[in-house]
Image (spheres, helix red, strand yellow):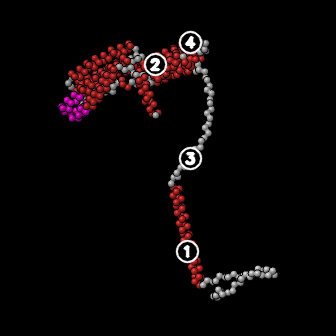
Amino acid sequence: MKKLILPILILILFFVFPHPVSADFQKAYADYVYNQNLYRQSYNDFQTAKSTFLTYDTLASQNEALSKFRKVLQDRNQVMVVYYDLINERLITAEGVPEDYKNTFSTIRLSEQKWLAENQKKIEAVSSIDDLNSVSSEFESRYQQMESETKQAFGRIIIGKELILRQKLDGLSVRLNDKLTEIAQSGENVTTYKRNLTTAKNKLELFDEKMRQVNQTLIRPIGEIPNVFEGQQKLTEANFYLRDTLNSMQEIINLITR
Amino acid sequence: MTDTTNIQQPTKTQGSTSNDQQPTVVAQPVPPMQNSENADNITSLRVNSHGFKTILLIVLGVVILFLAIAYMVLLTFPRKSVPVVELPKETPKPVVEVPVEIPKSKFATDSGVVQMINDFKTLETEIDSVDFFETKILPPNLDTNIKINK
């Protein structure tokens, strides 16, 4: 019976707090998964063809290697094209992300997809292994910039989640303060409650300090790759301070109603 | 051996005088002696008695042995539980507790406060279930160095 409690709770939470995910996001996600599978398959085929060519060095094996080389580069490009679409769709529905950043990323996405389309044309045009090596190197040089852009977008999405929670807590804090004022007007002594509320709000300073560290980790200048894992760890710590503040405010409510 | 069947047996006299009031001892007839056949029979009876005792002892031993085995067999089988007749117990009389009325704050039922309690609970759940990992949008695992160098 106890084993059933957790899945049921998760199921309830899933319906009570549905993720704001659009149908476009679901489609983008399906495309992303599909193209990743294509890439994995063509990458394996390329490795086999490459080994055969390097072993036997025949014309047939060279043609086969060239064909598989071209295919894997095309599929790799396509994965990045759909990944930009996926991040963009997720950003559209993300709460707590500034609108100007969403617009900026949309522009970045179009720019990168344009570059990838041009790179794709080069892949189709070249007819030698050396030229494909050259086109592949162009992708490699560009990839650091693409990684920086997409990881920063990822960081903005998860930071936005925590900022929204902070806003909601601030709203409840204001309501609680108003209620204490109302109680004081009715003749009750609320000095202790007010002092407790101030103490609770002071805990948010620790949250703010942690969020500054999160921003420094996840929002980097263009070209620098954010450390997503470190950012996630710091966000978890910030979330702890938010929870602690909430507990203190709930305690004040308990004292009022007792 | 002498024949004892013809021996005069003394008899008790009747109508005696007052001087003669002492009881007269009358000799009782002595049972005749058994002949040799009878002696043999006695011997035979003694022998038979000894055999009978032996048989009796054997039978007694067998019976005791049988009873001992039967007792052991009975011990190995689970006994049928004897239904216990429950006697009606005296049910303890419930102690009637007088509920202590704890005066609740008048704000406990205040609609604004109740709404705030619910909103705090909702936010609590959101904080606990926030997902910082977003597994669906994780970056792809690509090999950026795809080349063929001879």
User: Disc 3 on helix, strand or loop?
Assistant: loop
Q: Is residue A53 magenta?
A: yes
Task: Tell me where residue A124 appears, x and y as whole percent.
Answer: 22, 22
Q: Amino acid at mark 3?
A: Val
Residue count near mark 2 (Cα–Cα under 10 Å), binned few <14, some 14–19, many ≥20: many
Kindly state the secondary structure of the residue where label 1 is placed: helix
The three-letter code of the residue at mark 4 reads Glu
- The residues tagged by marks 3 and 2 sit, at their Cα atoms, a distance apart of 67 Å
Q: Are marks 4 and 3 on the same chain?
A: no
Direction top: furthest residue: A185
Q: Which mark is residue A258?
A: none
Q: Provide residue A69's location: percent of width, then percent of height.
A: 24, 27
The residue mark sitting in front, 1 or 2, is 1
Residue at numbered disc 4 = A182
Name the residue beneath numbered marker 1: B51
Q: Is B149 on the left-hand or right-hand side of A221?
A: left
Which residues make up the magenta segment?
Answer: A46-68
Q: Amino acid at mark 1?
A: Gly
